[in-house]
């Protein structure tokens, strides 16, 4: 079973992501802030990471940077309300594989996750 780390500070969004990914057959580790996400990355291995950009303690760019320092191969999907081009480019330059602007379709997310996990 593929393991997905979900780092999202909005409870409703985190729970809906967790529900959808579990329904798709993934083992999900939910984290409510960047610090928890970085601890999870340091203590485990994941097949894919979903992270928001605007997070308490450590932001999503710090999470992306930390993950890529530990595992360059793990794909990352960045989620954000921010559609600013420079922020999106920063995420890609740090190693993000995909970017979705909130709100997003759960079906589209599901397809993007499958695409990254089946490379």
Image (cartoon, rainbow, N blue to C red):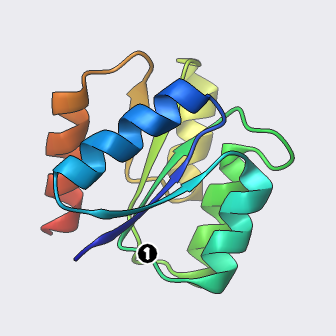
Task: Measuring from the top left, give residue 107's x and y in whole percent.
Answer: 16, 30
Residue 31, can we see it? Answer: yes
Residue displayed at 82% across by 39% down = 56
| Residue 55 higher or lower than 85, as above or below | below
Relative to residue 48, is residue 40 drawn left or right?
Answer: right
Badge 1: few (under 14), some or many (20 or more) residues near its Cα, within 10 Å? some
- For image coordinates 73% across by 51% down, the residue present is 34
Image position, residue 100 (x, y; %): 39, 30
Q: Is residue 10 above or below residue 78?
A: above
Q: Mark 1: which secondary structure?
A: loop
Q: 60 or 25, which is in the foreground?
A: 25
Is residue 112 left or right of 69 when viewed as pictured? left
Residue at 66% from the left image edge and 60% from the top image edge: 37
- Left or right, residue 86 beside residue 72: right
- Rendering coords of residue 6 (x, y %): 49, 52
**Vertical relation: 43 (above or below) 107:** below
Number of numbered discs: 1
Q: Residue furthest right?
A: 57
Q: Which residue is mark 1?
A: 46
Q: Position of residue 62 (x, y in %)?
A: 74, 55
Position of the N terminus, as image quadrant, is: bottom left
Q: Is residue 16 above or below residue 97?
A: above
Quarter holding the C terminus is bottom left
Q: Is residue 99 visible?
A: no
Residue at 52% across, 81% down = 71
């Amino acid at each position: 079973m593929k393991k997905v780390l979900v780092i999202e500070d909005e409870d409703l969004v985190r729970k809906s992501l967790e529900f959808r990914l579990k329904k798709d057959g993934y083992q999900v580790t939910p984290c409510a802030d960047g610090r928890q996400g970085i601890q999870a990355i340091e203590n485990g291995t994941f097949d894919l990471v979903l992270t928001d950009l605007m997070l308490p303690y450590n932001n999503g760019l710090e999470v992306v940077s930390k993950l890529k320092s530990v595992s360059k191969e793990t794909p990352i999907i960045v989620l954000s309300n921010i559609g600013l081009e420079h922020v999106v480019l920063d995420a890609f330059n740090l190693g993000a594989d995909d970017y979705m602007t909130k709100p997003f379709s759960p079906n589209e997310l599901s397809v993007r996750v499958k695409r990254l996990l089946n490379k």
